[in-house]
């Protein structure tokens, strides 16, 4: 097996796809309308957390690019050009974030009922959902908190799969823009486009 560097989105896709294939439980009976309403209410209460998850997913690769660019700025760009190039790169990252974060956030909110919501319907009873919503101190609250990793994983695997085709070209454009700016500032020729490694 060849080792290669994956983008965070591709790595997350690989990890979560493998987990999803390993989980093949029998279908649970359909939830009652009352239970679906409780789950919807709970997801609404959890929306800030869902949005934060989506923001982190979208911003992580850009933060990685910024770290790499910072190292190149310090080692390959003349001191008198660093501030201007850093500002341009910062603007590129802001533009990417302004475009990508709402896209991933909105998709996360749409996917939550069929991923995290489905897990809540399957794993918690109506009474348990009421207790979680009420934020009572109880063993049920602890049970819900233990499910939080599974809820996040269920949403992430679907979110990564559905946003990857849209986000990856944006990341490539951002990476190319940063590379061009750094190469121009360092006086180096632009690198040839990377070829995909053999799978």
Image (spheres, grey):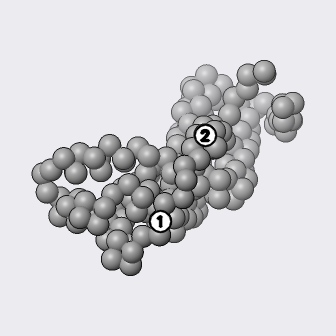
The quarter of the image holding the C terminus is top right
Horizontal relation, residue 108 to residue 22: left or right: left
Relative to residue 45, is residue 71 drawn left or right?
A: right
Q: Nearer the viewer, residue 139 or 97?
A: 139
User: x%, y% of residue 138?
Assistant: 15, 50
Residue topped by disc 2: 22
Residue situated furthest left in the rendering = 137
| Disc number placed over residue 92 in the picture, else none | none
Q: Give the camera-side residue of 43 and 86.
A: 43
Q: Nearer the viewer, mark 1 or mark 2?
A: 1
Residue 117: x and y in percent read 43, 63
Secondary structure found at label 2: helix
Residue appearing at x 17%, y 64% in the figure: 134
Residue at the spot 59% in from the left edge and 47% down from the top edge: 24
Horizontal side of residue 158 vs 137, given as left or right: right
Q: CA distance from mark 1 to mark 2?
A: 21 Å
Q: Is residue 156 above or below residue 132?
A: above
Front residue (pair 15, 57): 15
Q: Give the residue at x 34% y 71%.
A: 35
Query: Where 187 sits versus 1, above or below?
Result: below
- Confirm whether residue 119 shows in the render: yes
Q: Is residue 111 left or right of residue 190?
A: left
Q: SS of the residue at dot 1? A: loop
- Give the residue at mark 1: 29
Q: Position of residue 12 (x, y in %)?
A: 59, 41
**Is the N terminus in the top left, top right, bottom left or bottom right quadrant?**
top right
- Pointer 1 local density, CA inside 10 Å: few below 14, some 14–19, many at least 20: few
If you read the primary sequence from the N terminus, does the residue marked by circle 1 or circle 2 appear first? 2
């Amino acid at each position: 097996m060849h080792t290669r560097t994956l983008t965070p989105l591709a790595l997350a896709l690989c990890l979560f796809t493998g987990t999803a294939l390993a989980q093949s439980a029998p279908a649970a009976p359909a939830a009652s309308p009352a239970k679906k309403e409780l789950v919807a209410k709970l997801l609404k209460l959890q929306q800030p957390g869902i949005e934060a998850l989506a923001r982190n997913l979208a911003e992580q690769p850009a933060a990685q690019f910024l770290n790499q660019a910072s190292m190149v700025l310090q080692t390959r760009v003349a001191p008198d050009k660093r501030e201007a190039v850093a500002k341009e790169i910062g603007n590129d990252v802001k533009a990417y974030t302004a475009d990508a974060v709402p896209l991933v956030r909105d998709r996360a909110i749409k996917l939550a009922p069929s991923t995290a919501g489905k897990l809540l319907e399957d794993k918690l009873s109506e009474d348990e959902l009421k207790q979680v919503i009420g934020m009572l101190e109880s063993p049920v609250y602890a049970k819900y908190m233990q499910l939080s990793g599974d809820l996040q994983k269920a949403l992430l695997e679907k979110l990564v799969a559905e946003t990857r085709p849209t986000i990856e070209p944006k990341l490539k454009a951002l990476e190319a823009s940063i590379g061009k700016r750094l190469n121009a500032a360092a006086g180096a020729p632009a690198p040839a486009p990377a070829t995909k490694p053999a799978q």
